[in-house]
Image (cartoon, rainbow, N blue to C red):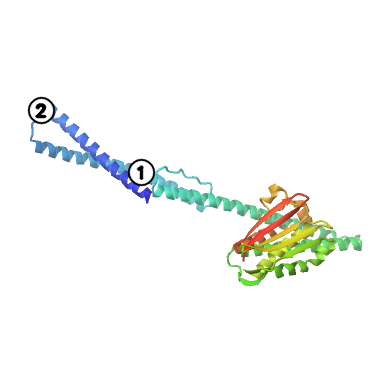
Amino acid sequence: MKGSLVRHLFGIFIFLTMMIVSFSIAYLVKTIFYQKFHLHLSHYIQYLGTTILGFFIFVCIGYSFGKIIRSRQRNHFKEIIDALRKIAKGDFNIQLQTLKREDPFTTLIDHINHMAKQLKEMEAMRQEFISNVSHEIQSPLTSIGGFAKALQYDELTNEERSHYLSIIETETYRLSKLSDNLLKLTSLESEHHPFERKNYRLDQQIRNIILACEPNWMEKEIEIDVSLEKVHILADEDLMSQVWTNLIHNSIKFTPNLGKIRVRLKNIDGKAMIKISDTGIGISKKDQVHIFERFFKADKARERSRGGSGLGLSIVKKIIEMHDGAIYVESEIEKGTTFTIFIPV
């Protein structure tokens, strides 16, 4: 509103300025002409001549001014069309020169620059995603191919053959898990994933998942410290089950033997606060910033040995965001990690 008023006032100012300049030039020309030829006409004739000449000069100035504006507009149109053609061909390195004035061209150019920037970022993410997927698939395929070839030798002992088959089975499972997680994440991000909220006991759900993981933490003799308040929550039970399963499995996976895992659930100001802490290997400060990114692995060597794909926490974060919640991580190397989740009750 304010910008439109300023433009109107500026247009009126330009119009008045052109009128004043035109009639000033007409008056000056009339005066010089009358003095040169010593003409003595009536005031009416002088006024009429000056007016006609003034309007003529005004029209000429307006036409020239309009021609300059149309020429600049054509240049802007050409730049915009060229930019859109480049974008259509997949070239997003576009940066049109921003105009200082406020008009439709300025808004259009700003939007095209913003669109090109967003498309460039999306293309970079797509390329990175393809690169990561290719890398994650190539690694187990190479292992499977190598050990399958090794199985062809007759000199192998039964123990070696069994060991190679075990590795092939592990790598096959890893590929299957990667495929499943990719499909799951794509489905969650497509906004077409089934999402059915219902009221259920969150404390019972978390307790059942901890008990389901008992063989894993008992094998490593990990101490489990659980404190769960009775909390009812309105959420998709199946999706939330994936969150707790992933986080608890991670804690068990990265906690050494005889370690400790603590799980806390409280209802604070209408929000369920869940804390899952462990005394595991921890995550560095620089890695904590990227921990929820797809395919990110805080320690690639150790993660690969555990069969991870770097998608689990991305899925966790997406599910929590679908429930209007938030997740935070605090960690220190060799001292442990704490994930804190807030979900509206």
**Whole-number angstrom distance, CA of label 1 to CA of label 2:** 43 Å
Residue shown at 64%/52% (left/top)? 128
In the image, which disc is placed on residue 38? 2
Rendering coords of residue 17 (x, y %): 27, 39
Seen from the viewer's position, the closer of residues 331 and 9 is 331
Identify residue type, mark 1. Answer: Ser
Is 3 displayed left or right of 257 in the figure?
A: left
Seen from the viewer's position, the closer of residues 163 and 330 is 330
Say few, some or many: other residues with alpha carbon within 10 Å of mark 1 (under 14 / 14 to 19 / 20 or more).
Answer: few
Sequence-earlier tag: 1 or 2: 2
Q: Quadrant of the rendered structure where residue 18 is?
A: top left
Rendering coords of residue 331 (x, y %): 72, 51
Callout 2: SS: loop
Name above or below for residue 211 compared with residue 93.
Answer: below
Is 94 displayed left or right of 165 in the figure?
A: left
Seen from the viewer's position, the closer of residues 106 and 128 is 106
Q: Quadrant of the C terminus?
A: bottom right
Rendering coords of residue 60 (x, y %): 25, 40
